[in-house]
Image: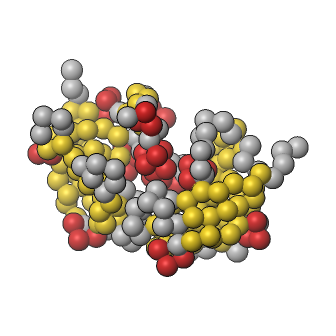
Amino acid sequence: MADMQTVTGGCHCGAVRFEAKADLSQAMECNCSHCEKKGFILTFTPRANFTLTKGEGATGEYLFNKKAISHRFCKTCGVQPFAYGKTPDGAEMAAINLRCVDGIDIAALSPAKVDGRRF
Amino acid sequence: MAGLQTIAGGCHCGAVRFEAKADFSKVVECNCSHCEKRGALLAFTAGENFRLVSGEAALGEYRFNTRTISHSFCTTCGVEAFARSADGVMINIRCIDGADIAAPERIAFDGRSV
């Protein structure tokens, strides 16, 4: 059962900020070529639960492979707090990099391992 | 004693590529506000052991706090493969070709308290 919390977060320099309702108990860590390089610890939430409060113009977009996921990183500090994508049935989602949530205790997360390298 | 190993690596999109010699048997995992957001796992080496093969123009530079470290990220994909300072180069082992990030011994560094 989802345990939604309201969190805030952003990049390192402060140009990009977000607010979201997310389930921190549903974290995942993927070993694909992209996630592993960025060290992502992700949780997914419906797009309606995610608000970019600052920095739309401050983000760069990176697309690769199927180009289905809009990876957004800060153009000033390079940190990627989130991405936009869709579920297989088309629902709009946001992927939140929990490393970028204010005051997060990384050690307290138990991310599920996803073998994205084999997808 | 762990020896120096020669590796190649880069960002995700391929714009930034480097070669380096370093001891990759131990990496520093720092909990400062910047490293933690990147999940950086860092191996240190002298400047002469690092060569940027391609992508100088593709790099964005980010400096903060004492501004002594030049954090270099790819402006196309956002990946930060390395950072440079007067003391040498910090290589994010996540960005080494074929990296097994679980293999090196991780040395926790309390950068948050520095």
Of the pair B79 and B28, the residue shown nearer to us: B79
- Above or below, B67 relative to B29: below
Q: In the image as oriented, which residue stretches furthest toward the top?
A: A1
Q: What is the number of callouts on the image?
A: 0
* Residue at 43% from the left image edge and 33% from the top image edge: A118
Task: State the quadrant of the N terminus of chain A.
Answer: top left
- Above or below, B72 relative to A39: below
Relative to residue B80, is residue B4 drawn left or right? Answer: right
What is the quadrant of residue A15 in the picture? bottom left
- Above or below, B114 relative to A35: below
Of the pair B10 and A55, the residue shown nearer to us: B10
* Residue at 17% from the left image edge and 53% from the top image edge: A51
Residue A34 location (% of width, % of height): 43, 49
Specify the color scheme. secondary structure
Task: State the quadrant of the C terminus of chain A.
Answer: top left
- Above or below, A53 relative to A96: below
Q: In the image as oriented, which residue stretches furthest toward the right?
A: B1
